[in-house]
Amino acid sequence: MGGFAGARAPVIAGLGITELGNVYGRTSADFAADAVRRAVADAGLALGDVDGLLTNTGLAADLTLGLARDMGLRDLRLLSEVQAFGSSAGAMVQYASMAVASGMADVVACVFADAPLREPGAGSAGAYAGTGRRLTQGWRALDVAAGLLGANPLYALAARRHMLAYGTTSEQLGAIAVAQRAWAAGNPRARFREPITLADHQASRMIADPYRLLDCCLVSNGGVAVLVTSADRAADLAQPPVHVLGGAQAHPGYPASSDSTFGLVSGASQAGPAALKAAGVTLGDIDVVELYDCYTFTVLLTLEDYGFCAKGEGGPFAATPGVLGPDGSLKLNTGGGQLSSYYMWGMTPLSEAVIQVRGQGGERQCERHELALVSGNGGILDHHSTLVLGASPRERSITGSGS
């Protein structure tokens, strides 16, 4: 998806972020409605201007198409639920962009909201929800029979396979956690802003070997929405438009067999190059990189598959001084990501990319922010989406000289 041009070229014109984290007493629908209204206000539009709505529900799984009715949205030209788990945010923007470019809709709200957390003592939503795996029969039931319930142990299998194949270490994963926490220090929305060291990472308790606590993302209540419209409509709106220059998806469908590349290669290897090609740019032109980080390993694998380093070299690359962190050469997960900031599935990297491209990052704002690369990951590496966002419809020429 890409090559958009002219008046109907799609842009993100509004961003709405609710209160995030341990926010109790509100449903996913409450958060979603709040996020959409904030995105509409951010763009300088009215709720009645929205003629398209795409929704994505999280762990609580309680956000439905009834949101449109509850918000009083009428005569919508596009209404649908999207579910590819953490890759859904990128997918929603792609579908909304195609709808706007084709004239199917003029202003499309894309929203994710979740409320799995309950007040202490009240319980929480099941951790198995949203992993993309269902209890089943046959060979695919063996992981359940072995007690591999939930995302943590299944992602741990992926990381362990990479470690056995390439020598990746826990300390190398820790370098990613440390770097993202350093970025979170400049993000007022981040839940954890205190610096951590590699020693802190290594001392954090084991969750699912090889994952320690600081390898794992947060769980948050809240909602995030973006508003996609056309370039001509956005020209007179309140915010700098963020142009959707390219996008792609990949859904590997790993077989339960010895020749599977699970843990070694992800859908990023297909979706990343395809999105860059659609946008007409290369990695060397990218200024800001916002990667899905449900675990530190997800970041490492995506870096390899996008081509920032060779396959198997993600660990040494991440651990090399001067590469990651606010002072590093690669501006990666500049808000702290899901490891330190907030967990809103694919909306976490997408929202930070919008903030950076607009130049509204405050203390954490990157000096160069013309082009952003955004990833989303869903299931247990089952789904992937990639977006290329830009501050202008036609970016600087491709030089391959790096950013």
Image (cartoon, helix red, strand yellow):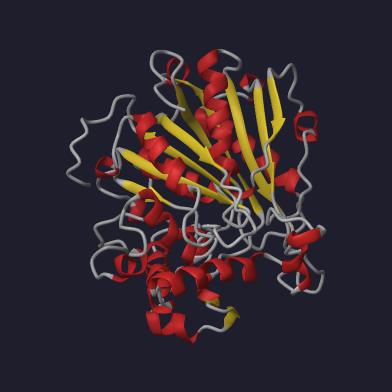
Q: Residue furthest front?
A: 258
Q: Name the residue at 68% across, 42% down.
A: 83
Q: In this view, does 106 lie above or below 255?
A: above
Residue 269 pos. (x, y %): 43, 47
> Foreground residue, 182 or 345?
345
Q: In this view, does 70 lie above or below 51?
A: below
Q: Is residue 262 left or right of residue 115?
A: left
> Foreground residue, 296 or 359?
296
Residue 325 pos. (x, y %): 32, 64
> Does residue 71 appear in this view?
yes
Q: Is residue 18 left or right of residue 353?
A: right
Q: In this view, does 398 lie to the left or right of 294?
A: left
Q: Name the residue at 80% across, 34% down.
A: 66
> Foreground residue, 267 or 194?
267
Q: Name the residue at 45% across, 28% down.
A: 238
Residue 260 position by quadrant = bottom right
Q: Name the residue at 48% across, 29% down.
A: 13
> Does residue 237 appear in this view?
no
Residue 180 pos. (x, y %): 41, 64
> How many marks are shown on the rendered structure?
0
Residue 243 pos. (x, y %): 40, 29
